[in-house]
Amino acid sequence: MSQTIEHLKCLIIGSGPAGYTAAIYASRANMFPVLYQGTQPGGQLTTTNEVENFPGYPKGITGPAMMLELQEQAARFGTDVRDGWITKVNFSGSVHKVWVNETTEIHADTIIISTGASAKYLGIDSEQKYLKLGGGVSACAVCDGFFYKNQEVVIVGAGDSACEEAHYLSKLCTKVTMLVRRDEFRASKIMAKRVQNTDNIEILFNTETEEVLGDGQVVTGVRAKNNKTHEVLDIPATGFFVAIGHEPNTKIFSNYLKLDDTGYIINTPGSSKTNIDGVFVSGDAADHVYRQAVTAAGTGCMAALDAERYLAAKD
């Protein structure tokens, strides 16, 4: 049972660019927001070594440093930033109820969900090693492709997103090798044709990643295996891109909020509103198209403004 009940004007769940931007706007509107950072304080961006495409940082900045700056900015205006994660919610009544770490019960007039989405990885030890080192493993070509200009890279995936990312990389890199596990793409015909017609993209069907090769600091290649012939191939590469999808961190809300087939929260077009009055969504929890820090920040602003207007209409 809950030991304490706290009443809040505005609760923000999640601490990426969307959550912190919502916090900045909500604080400045005297909504006295409380933000719970969740299981990954700072969100996906904390796994990014260099951020060069967020406006206002001409020299670039690391993902963790940028998140600390956003946190400081939110705190400066009065946001109460807390450790902990939401373990249960109940949006069935007029009061929005959430539980933190299964101990603290919170009743909130407005809730802004900024829980983001997590990139799916293969789970290979060597992949995780170089991901943590920031040495050549990425799940976002638009974010990190620039760092591999005029180099050779490998990308894993067979869907539309994988084809789109491979095509994006082909404009920057000298060669892109695409590993497809089956004997055909899952992508739409138009996207598959686009990569097949690109000269510097080599597609290896029936091929799976065995190991990400490196020198202990950075990626130097990828060991792949043909799952039909069992032939093993070492592919020289300085970058390894994983494009096998994202999983939105929304399961906890599924009994109350409308989700699409892949688990993303469905918002009213042109707003951050969900199907529950007083509950708003921002960032990658609702965005499976752009998935950029700057677009997440923009929707964080929208969510705070929508929440403020919702409260004003109730006064």
Image (cartoon, rainbow, N blue to C red):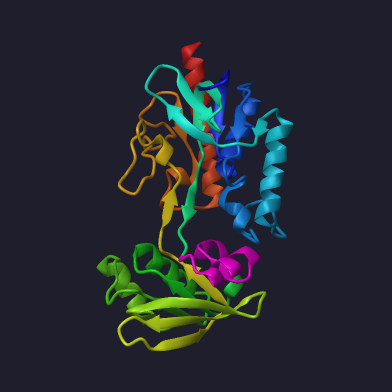
Viewed as shown, does residue 42 lie left or right of 113? right
Q: Looking at the rendering, which quadrant does residue 137 occupy?
A: bottom right
Q: Is residue 164 magenta?
A: no
Dominant secondary structure of the magenta stretch? helix
Residue 218 or 311: which is nearer the viewer?
218
Residue 92 or 66: which is nearer the viewer?
92
Task: Report x, y in % for residue 313.
Answer: 47, 15
Q: Residue furthest front?
A: 1
Residue 119 or 141: which is nearer the viewer?
119
Q: Is residue 133 magenta?
A: yes
Task: Report x, y in % for residue 7.
Answer: 57, 17
Can residue 9 be seen in this snapshot?
yes
Position of residue 132 relative to residue 225, above or below, is above
Position of residue 258 relative to residue 146, above or below, is above
Task: Report x, y in % for residue 315.
Answer: 51, 10
Q: Which residues are magenta?
A: 122-146
Q: Tell me the residue at 49%/85% (across/down).
A: 235
Can residue 145 be seen in this snapshot?
no
